[in-house]
Amino acid sequence: MTNDINYTNEKALSQAKQYTWYKIADNTAELLQDGNGIIEVTAGDKIICIIKHSNRWFGCAAKCPHAGGTMADGYVDALGNIVCPLHRYKFSLTNGRNTSGEGYFLKTFPIELREDGVFAGIEQNNLFNWLK
Ligand code: FES
């Protein structure tokens, strides 16, 4: 039940934000690979990580907010946290919260599977969004 509520809140929040959507692949098969299941892709002018975990797709920043570790070299634990390879800080794939408690926040990006491909949403950052 708690997970349903959290998902609903996340969905409401993501709907309130404005995104520019970038196609990152023609289909999910292009994104699947062996190894740790975390790959880097380009979305607009950003390099982000794409992760498949528990049959859901997630996007997050490619660099760790602590000291710039390469998140694609980390791993995802059984609880759905991406673990940075440098100092093992953990971040929720769902909302970027620093679940190991150091107080950092990892930027996350919504991923949508559409008929014409896989898209990553990059939050629009302009003055008019701040005024709304
Ligand atoms: S650089 Fe990622 S935990 Fe330190």
Image (spheres, rainbow, N blue to C red):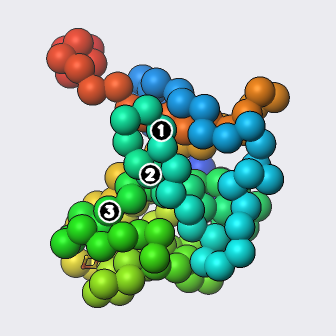
Q: Quadrant of residue 130?
A: top left
Characterize the local packing of mark 1: few (<14), some (14-19) or many (20 or more) Cα atoms within 10 angstroms. some
The answer to whether mark 1 and mark 2 are in CB contact below 8 A is yes
Q: Which mark is residue 85?
A: none
**Residue appearing at x 38%, y 42% in the figure:** 46
For the residue labelled by badge 3, is the local secondary structure a helix, a strand or a loop? loop
Say which of 57 and 69 sits in front.
Answer: 69
Which comes before the other along the chain, label 3 or label 2? Answer: 2
Residue 115 at least partly seen:
yes
Dot 3 amino acid type: Lys
The residue at 69%/55% (across/down) is: 31
Q: Position of residue 64 (x, y in %)?
A: 30, 67
What residue is disc 2 on? Answer: 48
| Mark sitting earlier along the chain (1/2) | 1
Q: Which mark is residue 63?
A: 3
Q: Residue at x 23, y 12 (%)?
A: 128
Image coordinates of residue 22 in percent, x first then y, are 54, 30
Position of residue 14 measured from the top left corner of the image (x, y, whole percent): 48, 35
Residue farthest to the bottom, as pictured: 87
**Whether residue 10 can be seen here:** no
The residue drawn where x is 46% and y is 76% is: 73
**On-image quarter of the C terminus:** top left
Q: CA distance from mark 3 to mark 2?
A: 8 Å
Q: CA distance from mark 3 to mark 1?
A: 14 Å
Above or below, 122 against 93 in this view is above
Amino acid bearing label 2: Ile
Mark 3, other Cα within 10 Å: few <14 / some 14–19 / many ≥20: some
Asked whether, in this view, residue 91 is left or right of residue 129, the answer is right
